[in-house]
């Protein structure tokens, strides 16, 4: 009779140097031992969170990321406190831990594990990194797409948060809230949106008030575009997701071919009326952990005159 590998050895096999590739066998084996392995995976999340909190570099292993995506695949809601703690690291530290994963997959993770009360607290928490808050705002689109919330309920919640942001001079939240509301063709929120643009945003957000007004011409078609582009909720396959991030981690260039990139822009132009010179999140980015980068509050190197985080750095 085959003797089961001790769960500690299985976790060590997951927590290997990511330069050695994705530990497929260990991740697959962990699926059959879900309940045993979950506490150990949560411990990996907490370990790297504490390293970063103490000013150290996160370990160059696949443990944190394997744990994050396996726990999401397992729909392990008991892991949420550890994940929220990692997302609550001050300043830019969440990026030190998550890299580009923070602005590509975290809304999917939160949509799987968190409820609306948690999401509301995150959106309103000014101590959180603004990109973490924005990921929380994006969860509402998942909820609408998945049938957990109506479009009207999502707009009402985002509108309430925007009112709070206006009342409390919370400009960092305003950028995300206005961008998220745009997806819903939000005619009922136009008073708050006009106030936000007049008082704070002007032309800094990558689209204008007129773009929002134009979305009201065909609201159903407009929101369907965003619902179609909404990433899948959760993590159906942790192994495949890790390969997405690890396989090209050593490349500093976008692996998308020129023809594929042209095709991507043609699709975006057809759906949204935007071209390659406009502000759009690059969904093909595969930089694993951020290296030296332009500060989010620095002037954008494209010479637009805007802050990097509100121009080419949006979504990074």
Image: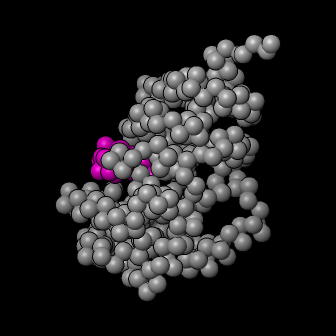
Q: Is residue 76 left or right of residue 201?
A: right
**Farthest front residue?**
1
Q: Residue at x 71, y 16 (%)?
A: 5
Q: Is residue 294 above or below residue 55?
A: below
Which quarter of the picture shows residue 158?
A: bottom left
Count the numbered circles shown.
Answer: 0
Q: Residue at x 34, y 64 (%)?
A: 153
Residue 299 x %, y %: 45, 59
Q: Position of residue 239 (x, y in %)?
A: 69, 40
Quadrant of image for the N terminus: top right
Would residue 308 be seen by someone viewing this image from the given angle?
A: no
Q: Which residues are magenta?
A: 119-135
Q: Classify 303 as above or below 116.
A: below
In the picture, residue 190 is in which quadrant?
bottom left
The reply, left or right, for residue 17 in relation to residue 291 is right
Magenta segment includes 94: no
Q: Residue lying farthest right?
A: 1
């Amino acid at each position: 009779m085959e003797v089961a590998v001790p769960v500690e050895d299985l976790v060590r096999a997951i927590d290997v140097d990511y330069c050695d590739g994705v530990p497929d066998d260990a991740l697959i084996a962990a699926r059959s031992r879900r309940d045993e392995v979950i506490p150990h995976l949560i411990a990996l999340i907490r370990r790297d969170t504490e390293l970063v909190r103490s000013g150290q570099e996160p370990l160059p292993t696949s443990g944190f990321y394997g744990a994050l995506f396996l726990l999401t695949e397992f729909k392990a809601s008991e892991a949420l406190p550890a994940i929220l703690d990692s997302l609550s690291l001050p300043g830019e530290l969440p990026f030190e831990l998550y890299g580009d994963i923070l602005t590509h997959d975290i809304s999917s993770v939160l949509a799987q594990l968190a409820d609306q009360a948690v999401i509301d607290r995150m959106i309103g928490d000014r101590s959180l990194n603004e990109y973490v808050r924005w990921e929380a705002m994006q969860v509402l689109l998942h909820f609408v797409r998945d049938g957990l919330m109506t479009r009207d309920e999502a707009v009402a919640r985002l509108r309430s948060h925007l009112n709070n942001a206006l009342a409390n001079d919370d400009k960092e939240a305003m950028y995300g809230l206005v961008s998220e509301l745009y997806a819903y063709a939000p005619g009922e929120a136009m008073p708050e949106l006009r106030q936000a643009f007049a008082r704070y945003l002007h032309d800094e957000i990558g689209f204008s008030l007129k773009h929002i007004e134009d979305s009201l011409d065909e609201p159903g078609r407009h929101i369907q575009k965003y619902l179609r582009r909404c990433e899948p909720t959760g993590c159906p396959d942790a192994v495949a997701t890790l390969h997405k991030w690890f396989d090209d981690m050593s490349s500093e260039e976008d692996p998308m071919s020129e023809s594929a990139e042209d095709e991507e822009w043609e699709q975006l132009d057809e759906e949204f009326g935007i071209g390659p010179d406009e502000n759009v999140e690059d969904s093909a980015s595969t930089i694993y952990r951020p290296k030296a980068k332009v500060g989010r509050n620095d002037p954008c190197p494209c010479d637009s005159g805007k802050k990097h985080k509100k121009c080419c750095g949006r979504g990074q």
